[in-house]
Amino acid sequence: MTIQVGIVGATGYTALEVARLLLSHPEATLVAATSRADAGKPLSAVHPSLSGRCDVVIETLDADEIAKKCDVVMCCLPHGASAETCKQLVEAGTRVVDFSADFRLSNRELYEKWYGVTHPWPERIGKTPYGLPEFYADEIRSSDLVANPGCYPTSVILPLQPLLHSDMIEATDIIVDSKSGVSGAGRSPKLGTLYCEVNDSIAAYGVGSHRHQPEMVDILHRAAGTLPSILFTPHLTPMDRGILSTIYVKPKTDAGGGKVHAKQLIETWQKRYRDCPFLVPTDALPATKHVAGTNYVHMTARDAADRIVIVCAIDNLTKGASGAAIQNMNVMFGVNEGLGL
């Protein structure tokens, strides 16, 4: 079987990354792409790196027509607009991986508090699998809709979940300092992401108010059974892609009466993720270049005074977005989880 894939909202960086990954996928092919602004153009006219490799022509969105062509659709629309489109696509008979935050959180009240819009499909909030196959593969496999994770949350949830679940660290005192490449802000031009603003600079943003913080807390509560308290500060760095998250945690006392130390954290990850193809606990300090263009997650830990410092690196466009979506698609259709990645 060849999985027929469509992309809704095909002009952004995540859509390009999906198309790039599908070009090397042995059991899936891109058959449709939509955009209101660029209908009628070849996808390669919007993304020149696809020239000579992709002959898909962009069309306007008609959910019924897209559903006829596609086994699954990658929905790369902003929050609010995405939920309504996902509803139309699912009702038309295709499966969907949603890149927005519309179905990630556990309840409507939390979503509407942080996103400031009335949810157009509230029946699916809290009933849509969160797209980390490392935790939710069984639910993803049978679902018609999957909530693809946020990029920052991926770099925080994956290292923290086994530690909270094993009661190795304090849940009430977690500090997360994350740095992201500029592609994380999307392709639409904005003052803060212009070359002259970003080059030779690093800047914090969304201090105390970033929407990925409640996602981290909500999913960790769901996946680890413990409600954590997280102080999260993101930063924009002058690079195209990548996320490096530095996480400061306080260790608990182990079974021998001493404090848990960094080596025990690494051993816990090795045990928890031994069957997960993309999770790589390492003794070396991770860097964004080590994972650039891949779906891999590198993580390590170091003892530091009364804390343990965790460092996690991912590619924000791959494991932080489009690679995760391909991984979810593979699980949904029962093929090898790592195909095309």
Image (cartoon, rainbow, N blue to C red):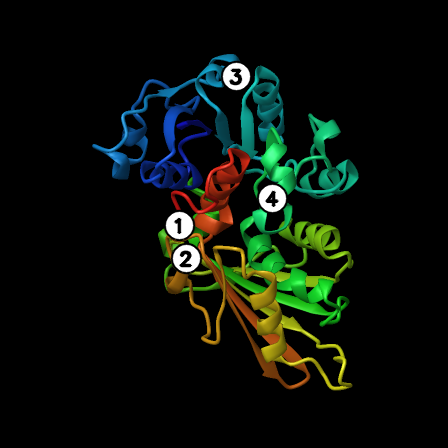
The amino acid on which the numbered mark 2 sits, given as a three-letter code, is Val
Q: Is residue 324 left or right of residue 114?
A: left
- Considering depth in this image, is 238 or 61 the residue closer to the camera? 61
The residue at which mark 4 appears reads as: 137
- Inter-mark Cα distance, 3 to 4: 27 Å
State which tag comes first along the sequence, 4 or 1: 4
Q: Label 2, on which residue?
A: 198
Q: Position of residue 75 (x, y in %)?
A: 51, 31
Please state the horizontal and vertical placement of residue 57, each as a whole percent of the image.
32, 21
User: First in sequence: mark 4 or mark 2?
Assistant: 4
Q: Is residue 168 above or below residue 82?
A: below
Measured in 3D between alpha carbons, the distance from the residue under mark 2 to the one under mark 3, in whole angstroms, is 38 Å
Q: Which residue is mark 1?
A: 194
Q: Amino acid at mark 3?
A: Ala
Q: Is residue 155 visible?
A: yes
Q: Earlier in the sequence, mark 3 or mark 1?
A: 3
**Nearer the observer, 187 or 8:** 8
Residue placed at 57% from the left, 72% from the top? Answer: 266
Characterize the local packing of mark 1: few (<14), some (14-19) or many (20 or more) Cα atoms within 10 angstroms. Answer: few
Answer with mark 2 or mark 3, whichever residue precedes in sequence. 3
Q: Nearer the viewer, mark 2 or mark 3?
A: 3
